[in-house]
Image (tube, rainbow, N blue to C red):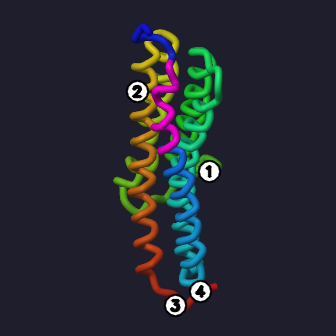
Amino acid sequence: MRGDELSLDRWANFYLVTSTAAATLIGLLFVVITLAAERMRKEEAAKIQLYLTPTVVFFASTLCVAALLTFPNHTPLTAALCCGLVGVVGLLYSASMVVGQGGRKARYEQPSDMIQYAGIPFAAYGLLVLGGVLLCREAQRGLTLVAVGMLVLIALALRNSWAIAVDVVSSRAGPGKE
């Protein structure tokens, strides 16, 4: 086998592990938020939504790429389209996190949050797109870039999940809770 042939079989375990991790962590994140929901005040709930949605999107993107690449009988073109499609949608989503909904800029607590919730994900989704483009010419290098993008999204979502869980658990229900 030549080094530039598409061999998704060699990546099967990677996709299995990443998709399982992403799906499990999405479920765990929902459990934490559901259990802690009664402790949150109204203004805290809006803040959690700002931070929770991107985290779920990062996990879901990883799950989606892994699921799409496990379809049997991919050609380099179909695999590239799968990676590119998820990557482009992710790039658009990351850009929307800077602009915000309806043209209003998202209100992050710290300036560094913009990097963690928009900048780094933009780079990770860019790796998915670049890896997809490269898949047609140098398959294994393209798949490696896609894998790095997926791992960056998982690592970022894990970090964000931990921050959300700590914030929710450490907050106390008080006056104004509705």
Residue marked by disc 1 = 101
In which quarter of the view is residue 160 placed?
bottom left
Q: Is residue 51 left or right of residue 170?
A: right
* Mark nearer the N terminus (3 vs 1): 1
* Mark nearer the N terminus (3 vs 2): 2
* Mark nearer the N terminus (1 vs 2): 1
- As rendered, which of 99 and 75 lies closer to the eye? 75
- The correct choice, above or below, for 168 with respect to 59 in the image is below
Question: Which SS type dominates the magenta stretch?
Answer: helix
Residue marked by disc 2 = 144
Position of residue 106 measured from the top left corner of the image (x, y, whole percent): 52, 54
Q: Residue at x 41, y 80 (%)?
A: 170
Residue type of the residue flagged with mark 2: Thr
Question: Within 10 Å of the Cα at label 1, are there few (<14), some (14-19), or many (20+) other Cα atoms?
Answer: few
Distance Cα–Cα, label 1 vs label 2? 33 Å
Q: Residue at x 36, y 55 (%)?
A: 111
Of the two numbered discs 1 and 2 in the rendering, the one whose residue sits closer to the viewer: 2
Position of residue 53 measured from the top left corner of the image (x, y, whole percent): 57, 56
Distance Cα–Cα, label 3 vs label 1? 29 Å
- The correct choice, above or below, for 144 with respect to 102 in the image is above
Residue type of the residue flagged with mark 1: Gln
Q: Is residue 28 left or right of residue 163?
A: right
Residue 66 visible in this rendered orientation of the protein: yes
Distance Cα–Cα, label 2 vs label 4? 47 Å
Mark linked to residue 174 = 3
Residue marked by disc 4 = 177
Of the two numbered discs 1 and 4 in the rendering, the one whose residue sits closer to the viewer: 4
Distance Cα–Cα, label 3 vs label 2? 49 Å
- The correct choice, above or below, for 85 with respect to 154 in the image is above
Quarter of the picture containing the C terminus is bottom right
